[in-house]
């Protein structure tokens, strides 16, 4: 057994003794699971690591874990809204757009802050410099398109007129950026870390540190509305397990990263460790989840991505009962 693996197992043992890992006494008081099936979305992004680390805890709680593969935050939100998945860990903006379109999505908690970075070519130093520049996308309406649009609007640009959005079905946005066919790339780990390693371009926005983005959750936890309504015990236990592991990602990034690589969830230990160290996995207690929904819903409304007011999005698409209970239960 390697020292790293030994340390991880020791960490799990200590965490179990301290109540961080494993079924809590509160679980028994809540009653039996209404369902043992739990379908989680799975994307290529490294920043949603807690969802995969939590698998062992979720199985210990009695869940039969299944994964629904999705290629993006938009696909994850759509899977939740269509009832093809039960829980997801992804961008707040994707959930808000889904709720506005009538999808059955209930946002349950904030998860982490940060992870998105805007890379630009020489001569582009601020978001205001994006006027007349080319931004690579997989598709219009996808999360990168949405995020850059609201960032541009924040500094007075008209995203529809002032930015040249480039969608090339034959190339990925990162390929377009590296080859010089676009001026700006927006992404998250592992792609953002690959660009840094190549010294390709420079970062003009880093949401984990740059205001106002750093003051709000980037990723949030959401469930299918019917799953949450019919299975409150299962929902709370699943949320508890994921938030416990979110704490572990913040407090023990090295063994957690190794575990993800050993399980085949992540390919590179260095990228995974960097992701866990750099992003705000310790913010779920501190930041206000409703403020995040209000912040993004307002900007999405102002830029025309949604028609609903923030108040309507919050009223129809959020449920903070479980989060409020878990904040009291899982005090730092």
Image: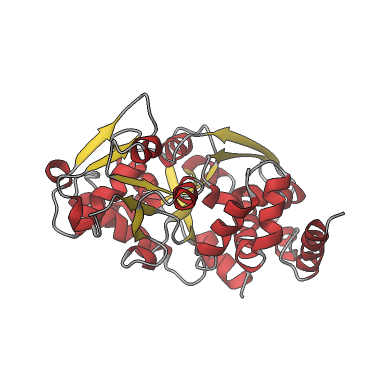
Q: Quadrant of residue 77?
A: top left
Q: How is the image coloured?
A: secondary structure
Q: Does residue 62 appear to the left or right of 242 in the view shown?
A: right
Q: Is residue 309 visible?
A: no
Q: Considering depth in this image, is 150 or 86 the residue closer to the camera? A: 150
Q: Residue furthest bottom?
A: 332
Which image quarter holds the N terminus?
Answer: bottom right
Position above or below: 42 against 248: above
Position above or below: 204 against 330: above
At 39% from the left edge and 46% from the top edge, which residue is drawn?
95
- Whole-percent x and y of residue 203? 36, 57
At 54% from the left edge and 36% from the top edge, which residue is drawn?
85
- Whole-percent x and y of residue 276? 57, 59
Which image quarter holds the C terminus?
Answer: bottom right
- Whole-percent x and y of residue 165? 23, 37
At 24% from the left edge and 52% from the top edge, which residue is drawn?
150
Q: Is residue 148 visible?
A: yes
Q: Quadrant of residue 305?
A: top left
């Amino acid at each position: 057994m390697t020292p790293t693996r030994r340390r991880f197992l020791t960490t799990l043992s200590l965490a179990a003794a301290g109540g961080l890992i494993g079924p809590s006494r509160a679980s028994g008081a809540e009653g039996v699971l209404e369902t043992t099936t739990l379908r989680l979305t799975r994307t290529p992004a490294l920043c949603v690591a807690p969802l995969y680390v939590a698998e062992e805890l979720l199985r210990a709680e009695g869940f039969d874990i299944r994964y629904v593969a999705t290629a993006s935050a938009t696909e994850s939100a759509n899977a939740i809204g269509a009832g093809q998945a039960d829980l997801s860990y992804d961008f707040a903006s994707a959930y808000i757009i889904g709720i506005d379109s009538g999808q059955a999505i209930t946002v349950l908690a904030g998860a982490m802050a940060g992870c998105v970075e805007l890379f630009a070519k020489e001569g582009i130093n601020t978001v205001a410099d994006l006027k007349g520049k080319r931004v690579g996308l997989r598709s219009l309406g996808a999360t990168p398109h949405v995020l850059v649009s609201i960032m541009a609007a924040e500094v007075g640009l008209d995203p529809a007129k002032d930015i040249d959005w480039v969608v090339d079905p034959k190339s990925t946005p990162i390929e377009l950026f590296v080859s010089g066919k676009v001026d700006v790339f927006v992404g998250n780990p592992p792609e953002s870390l690959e660009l840094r390693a190549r010294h390709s371009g420079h970062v003009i926005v880093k949401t984990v540190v740059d205001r106002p983005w750093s003051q709000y959750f980037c990723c949030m936890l959401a469930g299918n509305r019917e799953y949450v309504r019919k299975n409150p015990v299962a929902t709370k236990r699943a949320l508890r397990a994921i938030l416990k592991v979110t704490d572990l990602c913040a407090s023990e990034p090295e063994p957690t990263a190794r575990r993800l690589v050993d399980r085949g969830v992540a390919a590179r230990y260095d990228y995974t460790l960097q992701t866990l160290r750099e992003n705000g996995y310790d913010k779920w207690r501190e930041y206000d989840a409703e403020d995040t929904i209000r912040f993004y819903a307002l900007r999405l409304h102002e830029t025309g991505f949604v028609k609903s007011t923030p108040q309507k999005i919050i009223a129809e698409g959020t449920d903070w009962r479980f989060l409020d209970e878990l904040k009291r239960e899982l005090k730092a």
